[in-house]
Image: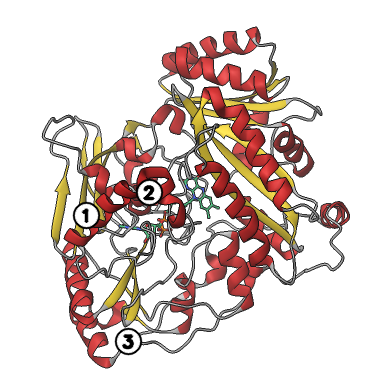
Amino acid sequence: MSQSTDLFDPAARWAAPDPEPIVGDDLRLLLRQAFAIEEDGAGASPAAVVLEVAPSRVTPAIAEALQAVVGTDHVLFDDAARAAHANGMSYLDLVRRSAAPPAAPDAIVLPADHDEVGAILRTCTKHRVAVVPFGGGTSVVGGVTPTRGSLDAVIALDLRRLDALLEVDEISQTATLQAGVTGPRAEELLAEHGFTLGHVPQSFERATIGGYAATRSSGQLSTGWGRFDALVERVRAATPAGDLDLGRAPGTAAGPDLRQLVLGSEGAFGVITSVTVRVRPIPEVRRHEGWRVADLATGVGVLRTLAQRGPKPDLARLSDETETAMGVATGGGGTDEAGGCLLLVGWEGATADVAYRAEAATAILHAAGATPLGEQAAESWRHGRFRAPRLRDELLGAGMLIETLETATTWRDLEALHARVGETLRTALDGASPIVACHVSHLYAAGASLYFTVLARRDGDDPVGQWSVAKTAVMEALTSTSRPPATLTHHHAVGVDHAPWLAAEIGELGVDVLRAVKARLDPAGVLNPGKLLPAD
Ligand SMILES: Cc1cc2nc3c(=O)[nH]c(=O)nc-3n(C[C@H](O)[C@H](O)[C@H](O)COP(=O)(O)OP(=O)(O)OC[C@H]3O[C@@H](n4cnc5c(N)ncnc54)[C@H](O)[C@@H]3O)c2cc1C
């Protein structure tokens, strides 16, 4: 049994630490006053807690069978490796692991390629071992929680060794990447060929190609470049029942598109081992700008015009009044002028195309009475956009509740949904000085996504119960049959946390169809028990 390396140090989960704290002493004091936090929790950030884990349930016979597939060095049993795979990155993940030793996976298995993944799935089926596919571990819905259902043990199948660019087709502008390639590594590998993937979720530094595909991720340029599932030409997955290799041509009428059964399947149907995606030449120019609009309704009107009449920007992000004010307070980008809403728009690509699209958008923005804030406002956001996880850790350390949630709806219902979710959260967290901020992003012709950030005073006695009440209230609102209609998730996926509401979104029959697919591909139910599909 081998030892893990510092690659698994939970403190090193975000790649580029800031040399200075983001929340300085002044802001910390301000926050404590604003949220009436009596005791400063300095040094007690749940994110920083060192972990212990229970003894592994893997028997010597199982260990030997796993090692026979991937080699002795690639099955890890040490506490650090197991603790680092014990949870994802939601607020509740961080809070729970500070309260008690987490239920860690019994071993970490690191396969080298597609065939080893298939062999591990067959081994685990034979030995009644649950398998949790693990990419970057950035799930915020319990997707990597080591659940084992009624099985005897659970492993995390860490895909980091599947880290190659397998093929670039420069003529068709596609690239085939293995599942464990992270966002930055994908860009490095593609840049050698003059291409970019341009998929930039906020978890970019750690999330992987397989994770993007398994959760149908959306990036900051998804308005123009498309969400990740829209970029996929071909996907290869290993399942306990055999291999799936889907996507032979850019268009087909050969029945339903089975790629869509793999995309968004969250490791419950199979393990994605490689994905062929559309790529683009590295942009000649990038132009990102900030604008100030009078209010949310004005900004929504501008975004709708851009989405429906075009030409579409690649980046579009409209902060509501609260998020705009918070951005100013924390230096998180935006405008020095109080009031109104910050609207960021951006274009990337060939010089002439960017100039044409930016000019068209400028005319629409001026017509709506928007004030230009220049490129600096957008650059300031761009500069700080990957600091959110660090900021969250610091706010947790200051005794706060901080979490995000997201949804999407039609243009007709966007503002009503914004109001309803905000009101639901403020009511559920009443007494804890809640602040609910939101931005509109990921534009479609018919609607857009809403992304909420919630801040409140953390209930020190029952932080899990406090957030669970609020989250449940929001999920009930999102899945309610009355207007405004909404989805339970636009890009965070289902995992464990959203599974109880899946039937409300796709119907009992829809859930049965997914169960039938799982029964065919994973008859022993070893893949990610309790994820995606609600418990029977
Ligand atoms: C700070 C922060 C910011 C975020 N911002 C965004 C954002 O902007 N946009 C967005 O879409 N999401 C965002 N997320 C959510 C998360 O990063 C995405 O869901 C991401 O796609 C997950 O990728 P991952 O490699 O980390 O997957 P993991 O977290 O490792 O896994 C996610 C799920 O997919 C399964 N899985 C992983 N790899 C595979 C595979 N190869 N085959 C089959 N199943 C697999 C896992 O079992 C799990 O159920 C954010 C999360 C955090 C913590």
Which amino acid lies under the numbered mark 2 shown in the image of this protein? Tyr
Furthest residue toward left: 254
Dividing the picture into quadrants, the one containing residue 161 is bottom left
Q: CA distance from mark 1 to mark 3?
A: 29 Å
82 on left or right of 294: left
Q: Are marks 3 and 2 in contact (CB under 8 Å)?
A: no
Classify the position of the N terminus by image quarter.
Answer: bottom left
Q: Which mark is residue 58?
A: 3
Element type at marker 2? helix
Q: CA distance from mark 1 to mark 2?
A: 21 Å
For the residue pair 337 and 460, the one nearer the viewer reads as 460
Classify the position of the C terminus by image quarter.
Answer: bottom left
Quadrant of the picture in which ligand 1 is shown: bottom left
Q: Position of residue 365 (x, y in %)?
A: 62, 13
For the residue pair 457 and 81, the one nearer the viewer reads as 457
Q: Position of residue 201 (x, y in %)?
A: 48, 44
The label nearer to you, 3 versus 2, is 3
- Name the residue tied to disc 1: 517
Dividing the picture into quadrants, the one containing residue 5 is bottom left
Which amino acid lies under the numbered mark 3 shown in the image of this protein? Val
The label nearer to you, 1 versus 3, is 1
For the residue pair 289 and 510, the one nearer the viewer reads as 510
Element type at marker 3? loop
Of callouts 3 and 2, which one flags the residue occurring earlier in the amino acid sequence?
3
Q: Is residue 45 above or below residue 205?
A: below
- Name the residue tied to disc 2: 212
Cβ(mark 2) to ligand 1 < 8 Å? yes
Which amino acid lies under the numbered mark 1 shown in the image of this protein? Val
User: What coloring was used for the rendering?
Assistant: secondary structure
Of callouts 1 and 3, which one flags the residue occurring earlier in the amino acid sequence?
3
Q: Is residue 361 above or below residue 452?
A: above
